[in-house]
Amino acid sequence: MNSFLSDLSPAVLKEISQWQDHPELGKLLANLDTATDHERFLNFCGEAFLALHLLAHGCELRVEVDTPAGKTCDFEVTTSDDKFYLHLKRVITERATARRITVSSRLRYLERIQRPYVVSIRWNSGLDDEQMITYVAKTAEFIKQAKVGDEFIVCDNDEQEIGGCRIVAPWNGTHVSLAIGFPSGFIDEAPRMRKAMRKAYQQFMPGATNIIIIYSLHQEDKVDFETALLGSHIERWDTQPPRGRRVAHGRADDGFWHLNQFAESAVAGWFCLNPQSAEIRPQLWFRSDDELANQMTNQLESLLHAKSE
């Protein structure tokens, strides 16, 4: 048995071991058992966990189904009402490993700034109180005049970098919502997500319903997935802002679904993989102007036990 399989919980290992003689699911078990490195093993974990999820909801599965173009679909999913094809891609994101950080109470001042933005902040470890006061003061000054997408490097009085700040997105609140980053800086994984989406699109089954599913190892990756799919947040001056807002916001033209790009893609999803637990919580996005996506919303939400976005 592959030593990587010991990473799985005993309950999951027992369940997938029953796939050994199955003509379709046996392929997934073989992939897990023959993975030569941990990254490949994680790739196959995503497939196996999604299969467990679909089987638990009464689906029938075919694995690695050929298309007329010589490509393969990861899953052909058959339900009592429909049939569709899933294209699963893992994106390896370069976020810092989760660790304990000390959050200064002085940062709470930033949350009292009356601007309706999600703001990502980072600061160097080991700042003394005077440096933290400087960081908060300069960051607050930046936030009060910045727009969505702006980024600021914060330096102390000796012009040494002590942290940073980025205006990530608008939100419905009246004051700043902080997202805590790490000293290594801000990482935008959206380009990698879009690359994976384009690769999945090339594997679509013609004349059928195809769904792209991206997964990764960090909860924070959801924001980058949505950016990759819908486009970067931008300020819009060609439309009226919502009532009570001074600025209207929209999406840039870098989204996978922008206008008529990749028109056969109507549904896409993302989930966070935890190898120690087979439970996945897919979240789905439906192309708002697509009739098929609108028709399938309820069915897919029920099937994948997922909340649409």
Image (cartoon, rainbow, N blue to C red):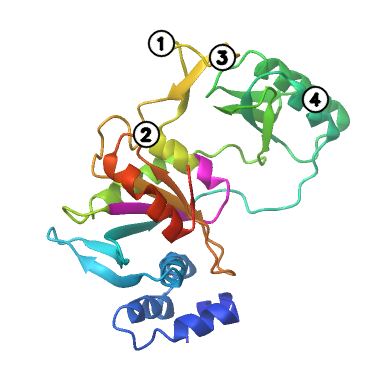
Give the amino acid at mark 2: Gly
Which amino acid is tagged 3?
Answer: Arg
- Front position among marks 1 and 2: 1
- Mark sitting on residue 255: 2
Judged by depth in the image, the label closer to the viewer, 1 or 4, is 1
Question: Could you tell me how far apart the alpha carbons at marks 3 and 2 are, in whole angstroms?
Answer: 26 Å
Q: Nearer the viewer, residue 23 or 208?
A: 208
Distance in Å between CA atoms under marks 1 and 2: 19 Å
The magenta stretch is 210-223
Q: Residues within 10 Å of mark 1 (few under 14, many from 20)?
A: few
The residue lying toward the viewer, choosing from 228 and 138, is 228
Lower sequence index among marks 2 and 4: 4
Q: Is residue 45 magenta?
A: no
State the residue position of label 3.
243
Give the Cα separation between the discs numbered 4 and 3: 27 Å
Q: Secondary structure at mark 4?
A: helix
List x then y, in percent, for residue 172.
Answer: 61, 27
Q: Residues within 10 Å of mark 3 (few under 14, many from 20)?
A: few
